[in-house]
Structure formats: C-alpha cells, structure tokens
Amino acid sequence: MTSRILIVDDDLAFCQTLERGLSRRGFEVACQQGGEQALMWLGEHDVDVVLTDLRMRGMDGLALCERVATNRPDIPVVVISAFGTYETAVAAMRAKAYDFVSKPVEMDQLGFTLERAAKHRALTEEVKRLRSNGHAGVRDEDLIGSSLAMRKVHELVERVAGTDTTVLLTGETGTGKELVARALHRASPRKDQPFVAVNCAAIPEALLESELFGHAKGAFTDAQSARAGLLVQAEGGTLFLDEIGEMPAALQPKLLRALQDKKVRPVGSDVEVPFNARVVCATNADLESAVEDGRFRSDLYFRINVVQIELPPLRARGMDVLTLAQHFVERFAKQAGKAMTGISKNAAERLLDYSWPGNVRELQSCIERAVALAQFEEILVEDLPERIRRYRRSQIVLSSDDPGELVPLEEVERRYILRVLEACGWRRMEAARILKLDRKTLYRKLERYGVRPHRNGSHQQGEATAAAVTTTTTPTPSSSS
C-alpha cells in the first residue's frame, strides 16, 4: 500500500524538490508551507508520516512535532535540519520525533527512513487493533489471516469445497496444509461424514498398502480378520493423504487405479470394493522435479493435481504474523491461567522482521515459549527466543560507494539464485520459472555452488551459502555522531 507523506517546509522550492523525489519512489505526497497550516490540514486529512523542516518561520519543526505528538500521537514525525549536531538530534527526540535527517538530504536514504516510519505506524495500529478485538472463540481449525496470499487460499477453498474434485495442497512444512484440508471438508457437503488423515511418510511401505486398501483375513501373518482400508473407512467423507510425495513407487500405480475406478482391492483379496471418498493430497516436496527425476509417476501427479492450492510461507503473509501471534497468546495464556493482553510493539517488530523458516508451526512454538516465560501482561522482546531477538534481515549491497563492500557479478548471481530458491521453499521447478532458466541450467549452477536439495525440499550446502551477505542498518543519533 502506498505510504502517504505530508511535507512541511516554508521553502517552496525545497518542498517541491522533495515532492518530486518522493513521488518518483512511489509515495503519495502533500505539502504545507508552515506548522500552523499543517496542523489545520491534519485536522481534515490522514497521512502515514509527517516530514518537517526544523527551521521555519512561525511554528518551527520541533514545536510542530510536539503538537502532532499531542494531537495525533499515531502519526510519526521525521525532522530535517541543515544543523546536524548531536544537540539538535537530541532536541528532536525530546520533541518525540520518530527520526532525524540531516541536510543535504540523500533521497534514497530519506525514502528508506519514511518507509520505516510508515511501517512503524502500521505496526502500532495493528497491535492496538489486535488488543481491542482479540480472537476469543476462534477454533484451532479455522484459517486465520487476511493477507492477500491467504485471501486467495480462502477463495479457492470456497470455490472448490462444494465439488468432489481431487485437490493438491502444496507449501513448505508448517504452513497449515492439514488445516486447509479440514477447512475443505467442513465447507463441503461431506462435512457430517468422516475426515480420515494419513501421513504417507510415517507408515512403513509394507504396511501402507494395507492401511490404504485394507486386507483380507489371512493375507499375512497378523491378519487374523479382514480390515477395511482408509479409503473405505472415509466413506462419504474425505481422505487426506499427507506427504504424498513420499508414496512408495510400488504403490503409486495402485493408488492411481483406485482413484480412477473408485474401487480398491484389499491385500490378499480377489474382490474389488467400491468407495465414495473425496481425496485431498498434500506435499512439501517439489513434485514436478520428482516427476522429472522419475521418483513420482506423472500420471498419478496429474490425477491428484486437478486443483492445486499453494499455501504461502509465513514470511509472505505480512501482518498475518501478528494476527496469528495474538491468537496463540490468547490460547496459551488461557491454558496457563495467565491474564495477558498481547504483544508489545518492540516484540511485534521482531516477529515481523524474522523469516520464519518453520512457518506457522514455528510461530506457535515461539509464542508458547514466550507466554510461559512472560512476567507481564504483554509479550516483551526478552521473552522471545534468542534466534528471533538477534535476527537481522540481510541483503546484497548494490548502492555502496565503498568498493570493499561490492562483490563480483557471479557472486551476485549466486546469492540471488539461492535467495529465489529460499523464497520458493527450494522448489527447483518454480525457481527456474521465476529465474527464466531451464531446469538443467539451474541444476548445473546449484551443483557448482555445492547445493544438494533433499527429497523433502530442504537442502545442504558446502562452503557456498546464501547467508554470506551484507547487513545494512540505519544509524541513529548518538554521542559519537
């Protein structure tokens, strides 16, 4: 969403220069030539950040900052001054300014500061909203989140729930694929019938066939009586096949035949048994690559992938992180008998900055730990795990004037490819599409980097690592400046 900025400066030429520069960077900008006019304007309009010059005729920037802090404490104020001394910066902070920028203004740095201030305001409003609204009464099975990525998931669930179409749920570990499968079942005409879940990776190959298709009496040593398989046990309802990518090769054609004919032949039996169950499959593996490598049958892949619902990783869900965190705070605080209101703003910032490789499952564990350790009514930064407290986003430096910070083009390519793979959950086919590389070219590059993807979508690396990037931080006024 575009950030809205109010520029306050009695120098019209400088104000117009800032307006042009910020507009080109995607900001929505308004200008006022004085503190009094700005306060009147704010009485009728809303902005995300106020950017004011320090020295102005009439009300100066510090006085304006104090008035905004009193009347509109939700709006952060960034102060600009040609007098970039420590004393001036301290005065700005005492006036409750969000940040202080010295002239001459470097437009890229100013844009970064304003975006950070706008994010600060959005975060403050979200924390306030979560505390006032809460999520009492929300069932664990409900799909929580209002981000664009999750709205797409909700829409697909609603559109396909009323059909018997086979659905393939994809996404990284911990993104909530079983929750979506259960949501599909609850929203379907089959909701009053069984929901049966089985993890294909958790059952030995010798037993999985019997589990799925059933067995006749005497089919094997311990088969003292006939037993219906899960496809039949889910009669009228939904069968959820988790980790379908781990289905043994010998069972894949049998499952394909069962899905096509809607009949199963129990182990040791000559009689086929019809079944009426909707099948929903899930995987965190790259099934397209598995098909290419001959580890998964292409005909079974196309049979289960009639409708695919891709679950977004938590790092791509924006403020959903805080919505989920608030939900978990309420759940675990109730279990622990603690009266807790939610999450502090500083802790919320750390949660939003973290990359969440374990997705929702990792966030749930993090909040459970934080509630257990919390000594106050809200989660503080010190209640979070150390890996989250110390986490800093990293990036490749492209705009530095220091040659020592710049890297060869091949290294930039390596880091970017690994970053795209990480964002794709190490799905090589998807990464190849984004990078516009053919699959074999990408595989050769990964081999050169020493990256060996595992079958479950994770990876191993040798000396080549995506973590070898430069971290940039924003300086704050201090006694050494």
Image (cartoon, rainbow, N blue to C red):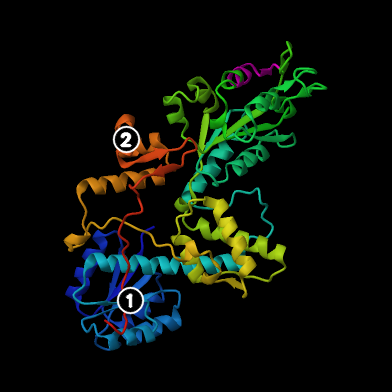
Q: CA distance from mark 1 to mark 2?
A: 41 Å
Snapshot quadrant of residue 160:
top right
Magenta residues, start to end: 255-265
Residue ID for mark 1: 476
Residue at horizontal 59 percent and vertical 57 percent from the top: 365
Image point (67%, 36%), residue name: 197
- Residue 182 falls in which quadrant of the image? top right
| Mark sitting on residue 139 | none
Rendering coords of residue 235 (x, y %): 73, 27
The answer, for residue 85, to whether it is visible in the render is yes
Q: Pick whichever, 274 or 447, lies toward us.
A: 447
Image height of 67 relative to 333, above or below: below
Mark nearest the camera among 1 and 2 is 2
Q: Secondary structure at mark 2?
A: helix
Left or right, 57 with reference to 364: left
Q: Amino acid at mark 1?
A: Thr
Asked if residue 367 is positioned above or below residue 40 in the image, the reply reads above
Counting other residues with Cα less than 10 Å from the Cα at mark 2, is it few (<14), some (14-19), or many (20 or more)? some
Q: Judge whether residue 424 can be spotted in this image.
A: no
Residue linked to disc 2? 442
